[in-house]
Image: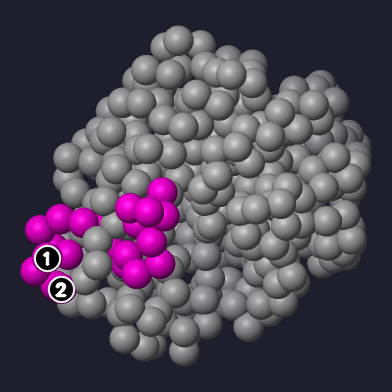
């Protein structure tokens, strides 16, 4: 396939270089070039936004061990269909990615079948069980770019302190699913509030998240290691993050689309497609998350793409697994909600939250249109209207609460290393 491309006449938005102008982007042999190559593929981009390839730093590809839910092949194809050129795979596979052998297998598999760039995270603790530290140094040598026990927050502050110290030694960010298990244990299935009381379901209070966010602020300050709080949901977490960042503490956070699109009232019919961890909260929390995005407290957007087989969700609410798919709906939801509905960001800031900001946190040479960089590009139509249809998903997962939603904004072409890996047929 030809990896030389001339992208003509689009609005070129590259926050990494503060570029925002009508122009052309040239790709020669898979790299950004100052001039076109003879025989390059011509792409007409008038009316479109030409961005660095979008990066999703929170994806569950489920392989190895859970191929009925998703595989590296299907998950990366779904990423391409959603406009993402790079993903960070979470380590809660089966077996858990807690040692170099699993990391090497995943890397080889991604190189063989991946439609987009796959970066790997390693588990903080052996088996993600929160006790013994995993071999962070050995996994770093095997190629991980971050560590996390996503889905099973490390409860021991001492273990997390030692993890932060080791991550600092190897230049790795430490990612954390913020959940105090003494306040929100395995029985908790939704936000603790009016609706949990009405529905008779065990609640997951905001404080369970906020206590761990505060813990992480202390650890990041003490060690200097960047700590990233995954899928934030509460107003208190935003306040704690804002205060920490104002003091120069290397603490960051991300927001997923479902946490700014839906509230706990969505669970009133016991639909398991609205069951997620952390849970949907209240309007006041959404307002705080939007304000945190507007003022830069939260500077990364992610999906927490968590596919499940249909039969797993088609059970009583308490028995259903947490999580929804997100790779193919996230860009549309973020455009729809942040640009058009709430107007809390402009287009360059939205692009930055999906490109250069996650790239910098993870230390990736991505998220830019700089000359000589790997030519990953997302072509975005921020005004395209479309309807979510789960039957058309590339992902194996169909567990979405957004089926039938009308959205405004969508990625229409995804280019990885100069090669088109997905193009909208509409």
- 334 in relation to 251, above or below: below
What is the C-alpha distance between the residues marked 2 and 1?
A: 5 Å
- As drawn, 246 above or below 5: above
Mark 2 crowd level (few <14, some 14–19, many ≥20, 10 Å Cα): few
Residue under the point 62% across and 33% down:
161
Q: Which mark is residue 216?
A: none
Position of 170 relative to 66 (above/below): above
Q: Which residue is mark 2?
A: 200
Residue 326 visible, this angle: yes
Percent position of residue 208, x then y: 34, 47
- Give, as a single range, the part of the protein colored magenta: 180-200
Q: Of residues 182 and 420, which is closer to you in this image?
A: 182
Q: Which quadrant holds residue 373?
A: top right
Q: Is residue 247 left or right of residue 209?
A: right
The answer to whether residue 403 is left or right of residue 270 is right
Left or right: residue 130 versus residue 393 is right
Within 10 angstroms of label 1, few (less than 14), some, or many (20 or more) residues? few
Badge 2 element: loop
* Residue 24: quadrant of the picture: top right
- Front one among 222 and 363: 222
User: Majority secondary structure of the magenta segment?
Assistant: loop
Helix, strand or loop for disc 1: helix
Report x, y in % for residue 251: 52, 25
394 or 163: nearer the viewer: 163
Quarter placement of the N terminus:
bottom right
**Tag shown at residue 197:** 1
Relative to 379, 373 lies left or right: right
Please state the total of marks drawn on the protein image.
Answer: 2
């Amino acid at each position: 396939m030809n990896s030389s491309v001339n992208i003509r006449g689009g609005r070129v938005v590259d926050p990494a270089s503060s570029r925002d102008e009508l122009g052309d982007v040239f790709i020669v042999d898979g790299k950004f070039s100052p001039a076109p190559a003879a025989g390059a593929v011509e792409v007409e981009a008038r009316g479109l936004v030409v961005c660095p390839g979008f990066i999703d730093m929170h994806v569950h590809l489920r392989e190895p061990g859970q191929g009925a839910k998703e595989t590296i092949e299907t998950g990366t194809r779904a990423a391409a269909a959603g406009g993402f050129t790079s993903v960070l795979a979470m380590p809660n596979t089966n077996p858990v990615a807690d040692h170099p052998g699993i990391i090497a297998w995943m890397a080889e598999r991604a190189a063989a079948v991946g439609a987009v760039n796959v970066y790997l995270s390693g588990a903080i603790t052996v088996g993600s069980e929160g006790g013994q530290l995993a071999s962070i140094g050995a996994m770093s040598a095997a190629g991980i770019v971050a560590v996390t026990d996503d889905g099973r927050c490390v409860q021991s502050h001492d273990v997390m302190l030692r993890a932060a110290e080791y991550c600092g030694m190897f230049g790795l960010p430490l990612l954390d699913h913020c959940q105090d298990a003494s306040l929100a244990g395995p029985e908790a299935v939704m936000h603790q509030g009016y609706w949990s009381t009405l529905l008779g379901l065990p609640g997951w209070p905001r404080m369970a998240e906020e206590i761990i966010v505060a813990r992480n602020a202390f650890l990041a300050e003490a060690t200097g290691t960047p700590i990233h709080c995954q899928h934030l949901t509460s107003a208190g977490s935003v306040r704690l993050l804002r205060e920490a960042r104002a003091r120069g503490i290397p603490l960051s956070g991300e927001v997923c689309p479902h946490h700014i699109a839906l509230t706990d009232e969505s669970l009133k019919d016991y639909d398991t497609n609205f069951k997620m961890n952390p849970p949907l909260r209240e309007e006041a929390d959404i307002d705080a998350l939007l304000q945190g995005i507007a003022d830069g407290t939260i500077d990364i957007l992610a999906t927490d793409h968590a596919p499940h087989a249909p039969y797993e969700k088609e059970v009583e609410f308490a028995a259903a697994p947490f999580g929804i798919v997100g790779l193919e709906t996230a860009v549309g939801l973020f455009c729809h909600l942040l640009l058009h509905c709430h107007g809390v960001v402009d287009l360059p800031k939205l692009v930055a939250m999906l490109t250069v900001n996650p790239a910098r946190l993870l230390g990736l040479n991505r998220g830019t249109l700089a000359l000589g960089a790997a030519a990953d590009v997302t072509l975005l139509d921020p005004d395209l209207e479309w309807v979510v249809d789960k039957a058309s998903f590339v992902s194996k997962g169909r567990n979405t609460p957004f089926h039938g939603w009308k959205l405004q904004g969508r990625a229409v072409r995804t280019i990885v290393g100069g090669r088109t890996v997905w193009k909208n047929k509409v």
